[in-house]
Image (spheres, rainbow, N blue to C red):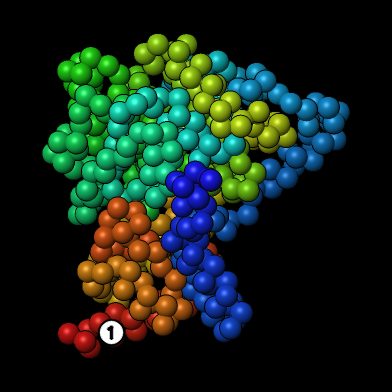
């Protein structure tokens, strides 16, 4: 009667959402101030003032028809040109508006790319740990997802394991850096090794292998860490970008796909993206928010609260005896659980009203994700609870 795969996806909530909803229910019982909810990656830093100013200026300056009407499917030409010039300024590229396709956020961008590229029998490769929705995005196209196991000592890429998964059916590789859930940034050495291997395999297989670079956290990095811009290293790269995190606009759903001119058979790839967007019910990205992000292009993001939160949580977990990498970017830590069963560990953490997401959902059993885009005070309150949780495990040894 209905598509069973779609029913399964619609009737089974993600683990992240399930934990978040549990937290909402629990807050009514004990008070929201007593819940340490690390489940959801929802930015808690307010959208910058320049966003509000841009919205008000646009509403005052332009007639309603210029703000709220349909745009051409790839987005307003002047918006795409402005964003292309901003990318060029930042990364030394040479894009024009013709290289950009405006979309409703990163999820739309990634889904459209998979739909545009996937043919029968194709495979896409992802590196654990990875955002769980990649699996349903890929599999909804009829392609399959192959997972490279995590290199847990640093969460860079295990190239031996990766090369073993590459086959003539490999159509694309998903790169997410800064990474959700590990918070790790792939080093330039990692990117150079990755792109060199893919270039070799392209020649061996006689067809392009695309990198789909998922970059919603690009601006959220700490210290002097740099995020390599992959089109500078590899021509067959599609960049999926969202303003959800950098401008704290997750609910507005605005972003873009970059298709570099150097991509093999550019016109066909860009046309396939337009066709995939059409099939995915895309008419155009929200027209007001196209104008807003164009006016705010290049303006700084406030990452200081995330860096402060990350350092506090990192040090607190280390002091409690957890194994965890120092935060590099995004707003997640991915510590090792205190037992092998990450689901059991996260369930036990609920006794202390610590809401954590099991690593199995991210392709990395035995770990958990803690999203620290929450209040600093909540993190401070959580640290004695993490210590009690760790002591419980020690006493059971």
Q: How many marks?
A: 1
Quarter of the figure with the C terminus: bottom left
Identify the residue shown where x is 57% and y is 71%: 24
- Asked if residue 248 can be seen in this view, the reply is yes
Q: In the figure, residue 172 lies in which quadrant?
A: top left
What residue is disc 1 on?
A: 391
* Residue 294 located left or right of residue 136: right
Identify the residue shown where x is 83% and y is 27%: 65
Name the foreground residue: 177 vs 280.
280
* Residue positioned most to the bottom: 395
Residue 374 on image: x %, y %: 52, 64
Residue 164 on image: x %, y %: 15, 36
- Asked if residue 83 can be seen in this view, the reply is no
* Residue 74 located left or right of residue 138: right
Mark 1 element type: helix
* Residue 387 located left or right of residue 282: left
Identify the residue shown where x is 60% and y is 22%: 74
């Amino acid at each position: 009667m209905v598509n069973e795969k779609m029913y399964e996806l619609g009737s089974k909530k993600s683990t992240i959402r399930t934990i978040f909803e549990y937290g909402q229910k629990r807050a009514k019982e004990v008070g929201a101030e007593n819940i340490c909810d690390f489940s959801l990656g929802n930015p808690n830093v307010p959208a910058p003032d320049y966003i509000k100013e841009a919205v008000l200026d646009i509403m005052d300056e332009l007639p309603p028809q210029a703000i709220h009407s349909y745009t051409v499917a790839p987005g307003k030409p002047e918006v795409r040109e402005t964003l292309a010039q901003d990318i060029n300024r930042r990364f030394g590229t040479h894009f024009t508006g013709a290289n950009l396709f405006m979309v409703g956020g990163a999820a739309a961008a990634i889904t459209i790319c998979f739909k545009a590229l996937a043919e029968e029998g194709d495979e896409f490769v992802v590196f654990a740990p990875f955002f769980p929705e990649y699996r349903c995005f890929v599999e909804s196209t009829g392609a399959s997802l192959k997972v490279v196991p995590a290199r847990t000592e640093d969460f860079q890429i295990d190239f031996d394991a990766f090369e073993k998964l590459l086959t003539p059916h490999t159509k694309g590789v998903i790169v997410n850096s800064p990474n959700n859930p590990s918070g790790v940034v792939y080093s330039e050495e990692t990117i150079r090794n990755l792109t060199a291997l893919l270039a070799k395999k392209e020649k061996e297989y006689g067809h392009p292998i695309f990198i789909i670079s998922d970059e919603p956290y690009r601006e959220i990095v700490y210290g002097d860490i740099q995020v390599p811009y992959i089109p500078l290293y590899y021509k067959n790269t599609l960049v999926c970008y969202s303003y959800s995190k950098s401008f704290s606009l997750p609910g507005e759903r605005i972003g873009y796909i970059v298709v570099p001119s150097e991509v093999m058979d550019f016109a066909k790839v860009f046309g396939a993206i337009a066709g995939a967007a059409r099939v995915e019910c895309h008419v155009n990205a929200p027209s007001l928010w196209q104008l807003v992000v164009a006016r705010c292009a290049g303006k700084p993001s406030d990452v200081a609260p995330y860096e402060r939160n990350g350092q506090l949580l990192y040090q607190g977990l280390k002091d409690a005896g957890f194994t965890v990498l120092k935060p590099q970017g995004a707003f997640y830590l991915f510590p090792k659980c205190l037992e092998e069963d990450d689901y059991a560990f996260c369930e036990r953490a609920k006794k202390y009203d610590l809401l954590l997401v099991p690593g199995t959902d991210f392709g990395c059993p035995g770990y958990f994700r803690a999203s620290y885009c929450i209040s600093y005070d909540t993190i401070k309150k959580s640290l004695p609870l993490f210590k009690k949780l760790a002591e419980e495990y020690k006493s059971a040894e």
